[in-house]
Image (tube, rainbow, N blue to C red):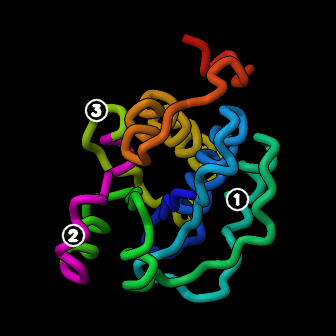
């Protein structure tokens, strides 16, 4: 089994959101058993729940993250993950300062789709902003799906399983 570690700053907004979206996509592709998706924060407050707005936005997409609890990333987490997916360049830099030898497995979320932009932190923003952020993250995941699978050393086993029209080519 491969491990995908999704990282943001506090592990209550972006990383649980992106981790949940990736898990949903893996399940639709028949790959849920092949990848463990976990999330953590560079500067998380351990045990904090996901932000209620993120919980609501994901619930609207049929995803329940009410059991999520924030945790701070450890060097062991970084070492054992097969791929480290970060939301902004500052998080890649933080990993570089902690474990420069692991930089080869760090990918900025937008880089999956050939872009290089940070996914902004929506702390304190309205549900509409968080919905927009979720849409952008979903777009990066969709456009970068083949690259994500390659980075994990996987091939999509059931591409026809995705029934959401946004994912049709």
Query: Reading the chain from its start, which is encountered first: label 1 or label 2?
Result: 1
Q: Real-space Cα distance between discs 1 and 3?
A: 29 Å
Q: Nearer the viewer, mark 1 or mark 2?
A: 2
Q: Secondary structure at mark 1?
A: helix
Q: Which image quadrant: the C terminus? A: top right
Mark 3 and mark 2 in contact? Answer it, CB < 8 Å.
no
User: Does the stretch in magenta take in 99?
Assistant: yes
The residue drawn where x is 61% and y is 50% is 34
Point out residue 167 in the picture as x, y percentages from the top left corner. 60, 21
Magenta segment range? 97-111
Point out residue 94 in the picture as x, y percentages from the top left corner. 26, 75
Circle number at residue 93: 2
Mark 1 and mark 2 in contact? Answer it, CB < 8 Å.
no
Q: Secondary structure at mark 2?
A: helix
Point out residue 92 in the picture as x, y percentages from the top left corner. 27, 65
Point out residue 72 in the picture as x, y percentages from the top left corner. 49, 84
User: Does the stretch in magenta take in 71?
Assistant: no
Q: Relative to 93, is 134 on the left or the right?
A: right
The residue drawn where x is 55% and y is 87% is 45
Most extreme residue toward the bottom is: 46
Query: Reading the chain from its start, which is encountered first: label 3 or label 2?
Result: 2
Main SS of the magenta part reads helix
The residue wearing badge 1 is 53
The residue drawn where x is 59% and y is 59% is 37
Mark 2, Cα crowd under 10 Å, few <14 / some 14-19 / many 20+, is some
Q: Nearer the viewer, residue 163 or 12?
A: 163
The residue wearing badge 3 is 114
Query: Reading the chain from its start, which is encountered first: label 1 or label 3?
Result: 1
């Amino acid at each position: 089994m491969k491990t995908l570690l999704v990282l943001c700053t506090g592990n209550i907004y972006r990383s649980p959101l992106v981790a949940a979206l990736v898990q949903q996509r893996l399940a639709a592709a028949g790959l849920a058993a092949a990848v463990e998706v976990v999330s953590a924060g560079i500067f998380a407050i351990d045990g904090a729940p996901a932000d209620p707005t993120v919980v609501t936005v994901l619930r609207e997409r049929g995803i329940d993250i009410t059991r999520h609890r924030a945790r701070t990333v450890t060097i062991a987490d970084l070492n054992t993950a097969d791929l480290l997916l970060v939301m902004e360049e500052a998080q890649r830099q933080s990993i570089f300062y902690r474990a420069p030898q692991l930089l080869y497995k760090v990918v900025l979320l937008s880089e999956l789709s050939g872009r290089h932009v940070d996914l902004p932190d929506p702390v304190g923003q309205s549900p509409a902003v968080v919905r927009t952020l979720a849409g952008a993250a979903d777009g990066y995941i969709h456009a970068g799906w083949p690259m994500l699978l390659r980075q994990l050393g996987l091939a999509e086993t059931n591409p026809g399983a995705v029934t959401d029209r946004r994912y049709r080519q």
